[in-house]
Amino acid sequence: MRIIVLLTLSALCAVVPALRADEHEGIGFPRIGKLTPRHAKEITGSNWSVGAETMDRDFTIYAHWKEYLGPLGIKKARLQAGWARTEQEKGVYDFAWLDEAVFDMPKHGVTPWMCLSYGNPIYEGGGQARLMGGVPTSGEALEAWIKWVQANVERYGKVIDEWEVWNEPNYRVPAADYARLLILTAETVRAIQPKATIIAMSLGSGVDYKYADKVLAILAEQDKLHLVDQVTHHRHQRNPDPNEPEIELEKVVRKYSDRIVIRQGEAGCPSEWCETRALNKYPWTELTQAKHVLRRLLADLGRDKESSVFGIMDMKYPDEMNRKGLLRARDDGTVEYPKPAYYAVQNLASVFDDRLARIRDYPVEMPEGLPLSVHGYEHRASGGQIVAAWFHDKIPSDENKKTPVDFKFARGQFTEPVYVDLRTGFVYGIPQSHWEHDGAVHRFQAIPCYDAPILIADKQTLFVTAAP
């Protein structure tokens, strides 16, 4: 099996796009190697999910991209169950299309979690099989929904224990209707799988905390808050770092519960100009997409928030190809090539897993006024540290110009510090002239920073393939 994994990774590395002329601009340190990709089966756990949505509407096809899933190194994948695709004749279920993904993903080291979502027009009052298509509201449709939920949990309960109720209901579904559906669904799931994790809201990318407040108020009034374990939100925005509405959502949730966890369930950006969908009419490139994805995922990690990137594969909608995938799709839905964002996420997964613990309130001194995000992490076994830093004030740019920054870490732990460009995966030695330490106090001079994450890392914390 190990040979198969290595061959797969070699095949993926063989199609890495040619480097731009400015990839190494402004670094000036000796390159000593590259981060080694790690298969999901080699990783015990991490903070990350990857979006595997829209298969319920045939916008992507699992067989076309499944070989790229394990080598990405991500441990979870978000699926959408698709009521209308499974039940096209009343009372008759065809799960074959979903079985393929749910039962195959664990073979790649990836655990799926499921969004139970979208209506079914074969029932009057059953809603439509699309975003903003409405939840089931009639007695017959709600009864059919419950039976379909039961069938999902009974079928997939040995693989899936995280169930999300509906996708972005705040765009159209009244809070009272959603609360009713949430309660019915959660109670149905828990009756079969008592220890299941119930995930609520799946709020659209505006993070509608006022909607969440209305729903949670209804649950509190009916003494049903115990049914919800997590609240998810989505976040598609040009600059991936600002989190003001997420802070407001945290306040709302804490008003009702100290137990409920907030989770980022869908974030990403296109890799080219698009006319429709989220983040449209902006000159995105594959470079800016890679930067955007890394910044969002690491910003979430720095806030102790589980996070999912949207999505693994470009999605062929009826009116447009949605280019938010890590894999570029041809018109027939097959993979044309992995984008730079795929390799960037692969690098992220290689470094940031459950071997590391975030250091809360990591003390950092740097020049005043720099709009830098800085987060420190400790390797649990060795005590070696990793510090991630990036400029967060602007939308990711289509250039790689670096700015030298001096850092002082009062509680540093570095034996052999190296510099890593997380986007490219290149690892560079930090010359002795650029760093010094006095006990725990470590100073680093003229470290090249830009609008994508760089790492100052103790080399022993990394998996590195030496430069030839």
Image: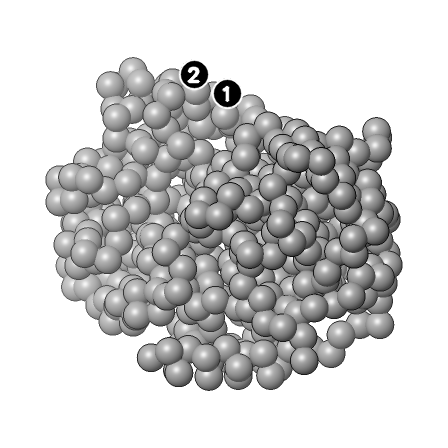
Is 379 situated left or right of 281 in this image?
left
Q: Viewer-proximal residue, 134 or 402? A: 402
Residue, disc 2: 255
- Residue at image x 58%, y 62%? 347
- Up-down: is 405 above or below 86? above
- Up-down: is 195 above or below 396? above
x, y percent for residue 333: 51, 77
Q: Secondary structure at mark 1?
A: helix
x, y percent for residue 135: 35, 43
x, y percent for residue 131: 46, 50
- Residue at image x 72%, y 40%? 437
Q: Secondary structure at mark 2?
A: helix
- Callout 1 amino acid: Lys
- Residue at image x 59%, y 72%? 465
- Callout 2 amino acid: Lys
Is 425 situated left or right of 76 in this image?
right
- Asked whether disc 2 touches disc 1, contact meaning CB atoms under 8 Å apart, the reply is yes
